[in-house]
């Protein structure tokens, strides 16, 4: 076990891995081999999905990566000097082995004082949106990635790193099949994007009753569901306001004022939560455990007020008050730049979790330093937020 700098277990609920170039291609079926590839453009490798070059992430091979935490000050204090993103980030670094494989990452966690961590893919969040109109291909590509993770990032490595496979829910039978596959290989957590599920009839909420067999199995197995920030497809709606065609979500593209402002309202996660409540999934399966990671938390009070107002207008249509549903089924990860005290007061310390977003540029270079943001809170609450709540969700004993 690590020599922890804190006198209690630390569980970082938002760590990321950087995929190798073969992560999404190694196990693709032969008849889908041309769906994903790489091409060199002006001396730089780009990923190609279904014959389209994507700039979703400018360096999809991750040979060079941004320095962890290089944009922390930007997210905390803004950009008063009007610097470009490149100026704020500075020079990148060669991708270290600890970002590529579980064994080296565990050694780094020991140095950082982290006992446990959720490990989430990075590049993989581009897949579903770019394959939305071919749900079979999406299911094949997600399965190929999950098979790669079994090899390189086991789903429960040494009982300390919990790597998170993806489930794409558009085809319920395929989603159930994939769920069983990852559970058989030790998964304790699954990742879903907060976006409509694309099936043969187009997009539909994954909270509609037709998806109940899937949610039933998740509840039966006690599997934790993570809804993490992703390419949710909302850029398609924003493009209508911008008057542009074909633009894609990019992590480091030139900012557009309207787009930046709208994306900052977190409508995608608000809509996903609203659907899970009002379409009844959380009422039909009240023991579901859903962690909202890297979606911010500033939107939560207003959304709960709005949902409770809708409830007051037609209580006969609701099973229970929406804010009560939220406080039972959801666990919140606030951004490190947000003051968590209001959220803790609203939800209770039992439903707030810590995540650093390491090693991303917008995350914390020193994850355990987040404890300073909790100064003045009761010690019991600090221990819950920094690790106890996640340990309880996964059934880990101290």
Image: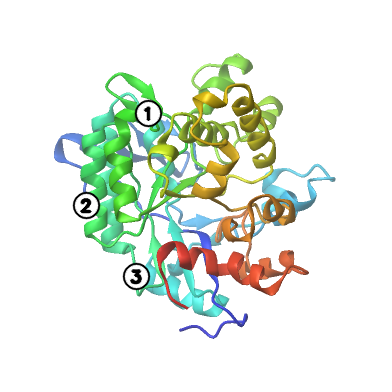
Q: Which residue is mark 3?
A: 157
Q: Which residue is mark 1?
A: 208
* Percent of width and height locating residue 38: 35, 41
Q: Residues within 10 Å of mark 2 (few under 14, many from 20)?
A: some
Q: Which residue is mark 2?
A: 181
* Percent of width and height locating residue 69: 64, 60
Q: Residue at x 63, y 62 (%)?
A: 364
Say what secondary structure mark 1 lies in. loop
Farthest right residue in view: 80
Q: Are marks 2 and 1 in contact (CB under 8 Å)?
A: no
Could you say which is closer to the camera, residue 9 or residue 71? 9
* Percent of width and height locating residue 105: 44, 71
Dot 2 or dot 1: first in sequence order is: 2
Q: CA distance from mark 1 to mark 3?
A: 34 Å
Residue 300 visible in this rendered orientation of the protein: yes
Could you say which is closer to the camera, residue 214 or residue 287? 287
């Amino acid at each position: 076990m690590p020599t922890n700098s804190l006198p209690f277990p630390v569980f970082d609920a938002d760590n990321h891995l950087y995929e190798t170039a073969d992560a999404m291609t190694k196990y693709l079926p032969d008849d889908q081999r041309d769906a994903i590839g790489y091409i060199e453009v002006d001396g730089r490798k780009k990923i190609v999905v279904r014959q389209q070059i994507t700039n979703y992430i400018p360096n999809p091979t991750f040979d060079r990566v941004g320095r962890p935490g290089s944009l922390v000050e930007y997210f905390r204090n803004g950009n008063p000097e009007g610097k470009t993103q490149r100026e704020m980030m500075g020079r990148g670094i060669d991708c270290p082995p600890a970002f590529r494989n579980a064994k080296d990452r565990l050694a780094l966690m020991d140095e950082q004082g982290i006992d446990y961590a959720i490990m989430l893919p990075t590049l993989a969040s581009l897949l579903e949106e770019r394959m939305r109109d071919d749900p079979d291909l999406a299911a094949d590509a997600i399965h190929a990635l999950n098979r790669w993770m079994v090899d390189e990032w086991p789903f429960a490595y040494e009982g300390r790193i919990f790597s998170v496979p993806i489930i794409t829910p558009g085809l319920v039978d395929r989603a159930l099949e994939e769920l069983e596959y990852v559970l058989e290989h030790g998964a304790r957590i699954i990742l879903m994007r907060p976006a409509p599920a694309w099936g043969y009839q187009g997009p539909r909420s994954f909270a509609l009753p037709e998806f109940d067999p899937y949610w039933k199995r998740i509840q039966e197995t006690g599997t934790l569901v993570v809804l993490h920030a992703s390419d949710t497809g909302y850029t398609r709606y924003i493009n209508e306001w911008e008057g542009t065609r074909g633009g894609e979500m990019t992590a480091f593209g030139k900012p557009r004022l309207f787009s930046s402002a709208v994306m900052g309202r977190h409508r995608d996660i608000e809509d996903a939560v609203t659907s899970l409540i009002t379409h009844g999934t959380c009422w039909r399966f009240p023991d579901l455990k859903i962690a909202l990671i890297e979606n911010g938390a500033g939107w939560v009070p207003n959304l709960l007020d709005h949902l409770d107002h809708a409830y007051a207008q037609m209580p006969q249509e609701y099973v229970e008050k929406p804010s009560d549903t939220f406080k039972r089924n959801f666990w919140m990860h606030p951004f490190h730049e947000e003051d968590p005290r209001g959220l803790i007061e609203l939800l209770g310390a039992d439903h707030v979790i810590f995540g650093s977003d390491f090693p991303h540029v917008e995350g914390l270079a020193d994850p355990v330093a987040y404890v300073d943001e909790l100064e003045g809170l009761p010690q019991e609450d600090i221990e819950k937020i920094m690790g106890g709540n996640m340990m309880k969700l996964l059934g880990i004993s101290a």
